[in-house]
Image (cartoon, rainbow, N blue to C red):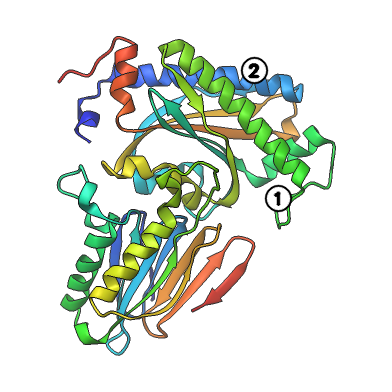
Amino acid sequence: MDDLKKLQPFHLDVLKEIGNIGAGNAATSLSLLLNKTIDMSVPDVRVVSLQEIPDQVGGADTEVAAIFLRIEGEAPGSMYFIANIADIEKMIRRLIGNDHFQLVSPPFDEMGISAFLEVGNILAGSYLSSFSDFTQLDLQPSVPGVSIDMAGAILSYGLIPISEVGDFAIVIDTEIVEVDEESEKVSGHFFLLPDPGSFQTIFKALGVEIDE
Amino acid sequence: MSDVIKVGMADLNIVTPPNTIRTSGLGSCVGLIIFDGQRNVAGMAHIMLPNSKLCKQSPPNVAKYADTAIPALIQDLKKKGARSAFLKAKMAGGAQMFSFSTGNEMMRIGPRNVEAVRELLESLNIPIVSEDVGGKSGRTIEFNPVSNLLHIRTVNQGTKEI
């Protein structure tokens, strides 16, 4: 992907701002949903090789809980909300008021899984709506999918459109952390992986085109 | 001292004893092993896509596509003393990690990868002696070129050897 070589630091800053606004809005929604204070990290925007992407969540065979959805519309891409299994268990237990909910061995409680999907829907919806407002691009989330599995297996899926044109992806990574309960801190990552063709569209929408 | 040779996503490598070769977190990708069981030499590829025809990358990463990874593996195996007529294959992966109602072709990438590998091996007369493909779960696989066994770990389904 030659476009990646033409990226300037301010292009990455623009993408960082998308992560900032998107995750900020999602954190607010989650905070309302859980009635907890949620903090977020400064977004990390990196150009990463396909092989290194699973390392961002602890390695290819680390087991994680993830919500995945495709972004459809003018700037397509893949989006993940990904966290370690114990953190998602805690979050879902509080939401559905069932202390026995577990994600360690199937079958998983249907109510809990559907609550997790709903969390994914809300988080992705608020992330995307601010992304869309900021860029004035028409974007819609697909129906989310849930998977409790190895990070490599989950992430490789969303990387397919990117892998068709190159070996590197731009990852917009924002971490959110619950702040008020030190002992039971729940945290998760948002990964936004725009499809290769989407960067031009995003930059153009924000008036920072890549020089040809 | 034996080492575990790691094969990343869209990567390939060759192994000889006492080492073993492993790839982690296979989802829709296919982990393909081609080996000469008598000469104890094996190669593994972590294949992401069925074919390189639509590849817009130059030069292409040969390990990423079934149609380029297989010839590359065979070539590397021959350099290490493997003989064409004795080559056999094992494969694992090609899962469907998420199920969506949309008929998007991207969602069927796992089965398409498996089909592509199968067709290419057949055209090269390389028999697939065992496989563990499809399903909805990720796999971590490790091949031992002495026993010629492929060790497979699947989340929540334990381990097995094929």
Q: Is residue A33 left or right of residue B80?
A: right
SS of the residue under disc 1: loop
Q: Is residue B55 left or right of residue A38?
A: left
Residue A84 location, x and y as percent?
A: 62, 44
Q: Amino acid at mark 2?
A: Thr
As displayed, is residue A116 above or below residue A51?
above
As displayed, is residue A20 above or below residue A196?
above
Residue A168 location, x and y as percent?
A: 30, 40
Question: What residue does disc 1 label?
Answer: A103
Question: What residue does disc 2 label?
Answer: A28
Q: Are marks 2 and 1 in contact (CB under 8 Å)?
A: no
Query: In front here: A22 or B1?
Result: A22
- Quadrant of the drawing holding the N terminus of chain B: bottom left
Q: Chain of mark 2?
A: A
- At horizontal 41% and vertical 16% (from top left) the residue drawn is A137
Residue A71 location, x and y as percent?
A: 46, 30
Report whether residue A207 is seen.
Answer: yes
Residue B135 location, x and y as percent?
A: 54, 61
